[in-house]
Amino acid sequence: MSHSNDRRLTGNRGSTPVKSGNLGSTPVKVPDALVAALCAAQHVCVLTGAGVSAESGVPTFRDAQSGLWSKYDPLDLATPEAFARDPALIWRWYRWRRELVAAAKPNPGHKALATLATRVPKLTLVTQNVDGLHQRAGSCDVIEFHGNLFENRCSVENCVVAEDDGADIPTCPGCGGKLRPGVVWFGEAIPKQALHQSFAAAASCDLFLSIGTSSLVYPAAGLAEIARSAGATGVEINPNPTAHADGFDFVLQGNAAAVLPELIEYLPA
Ligand code: OAD
C-alpha cells in the first residue's frame, strides 16, 4: 500500500478494525500506524470546527445548502463594518443563533473529545466554534479561538458584560456604548491569549487532530501547518476531505460523531 493510500481512511483500507459502529454504511478501519501514534502521544492538540457540532443540529458555515454562508453573506453579518452599519440586524441574527445553540445538545463527538482528555497525558482543545458545546460535553480549558456566542462585549471599552438589557441594540451599563456579541469577526484579531496558547500547543504536540473544519480560515488553519512542521503526526477527520488533506499523515473520512467514539476505544479507559 502506498503512503498516499494509507492516508485516507475509507471502508476498505488500514489493517486494524475499529471495534464497533460504522460511518454511515461504510465500516471504519483505523490504520495500525495511527493507533500506534495515538497510544504513544504525550500531547495531543485538537482543532475543531463547525462540523463537530453539525450532528447537534448546529449548521456549519460552508457546507453547500445547509451552511450559514450559503444563505447569508458574512460581509453583512460577521464584520465590524456590518455591525457599525446595522447593529440591530446583527443582534437579531446572533440572538437567533443563541436560541438555536441553547436548544442543541453535545453529540457523541463532543463527548468523545472530553473522554480523550482523560486518556492521554496531555490534551489541548482549540475550537473555532462559538457554541460552547465542548464545555457542555465536559471538556475543560477549551481555547475559544473565535470567541463565544453567549458573551456580550462593550464595543467601546471591550469589557465583558454579563447580561444584555434585551433592547434591540443593548448598551453597556458602564459607558452606554453599544454591546456586541463576543465573537471574532472577519478582519478582527484573535484574542491574544487564545492565539498564544494555541500556537504554543501546536508547536509542541506530537499528535494533531483537525476535526470538522474546512481549514479555510486563518490563522486557525495555520495550526495544523505549525504542528506538522514541528514533527507532529497530523490527522484530518471530515466526511469531505479538505484541500489540505494531502498535508496530513492520515485522513479519516467520516462524521466526527461516529469516528471519535471509535478512535478513543483504542486507548485504555
Ligand atoms: P466550515 O463550515 O467552513 O467547515 C465545516 C467542515 O465540517 C466542512 O469541511 C465539512 O465537510 C465538515 N463537516 C460537515 N459535517 C461534519 C461532521 N458531521 N463531522 C465532521 N465534519 C463535518 O466551518 P469552519 O471550518 O469551522 O468564523 O469555519 C471556520 C470559521 O469560518 C468559523 O469559525 C467561522 C466561519 O466564518 C467566524 O465566525 C469568525
Image: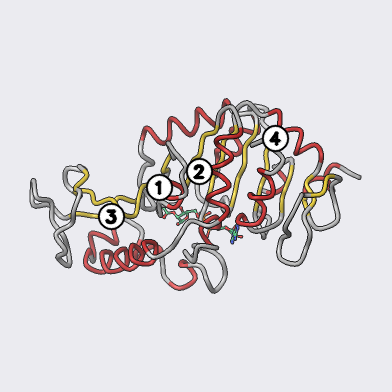
How far apart are labels 1 and 3 at the CA level? 11 Å
Amino acid type, label 1: His
Secondary structure, mark 1, is: loop
> In the rendering, at what x and y percent does residue 180 appear?
24, 55
Amino acid type, label 4: Leu
What is the quadrant of the C terminus in the image? top right
How packed is label 1: few (under 14 Cα within 10 Å), some, or many (20 or more)?
many
Residue wearing tag 3: 181
Q: Is residue 97 above or below residue 185?
A: below
Residue wearing tag 1: 146
Front disc: 4 or 2: 4
Residue wearing tag 2: 220
Can you name the residue that lies furthest to the right here? 1
Q: Is mark 1 within 8 Å of ligand 1?
A: yes
Residue 38 disc label: 4
Front disc: 1 or 4: 4
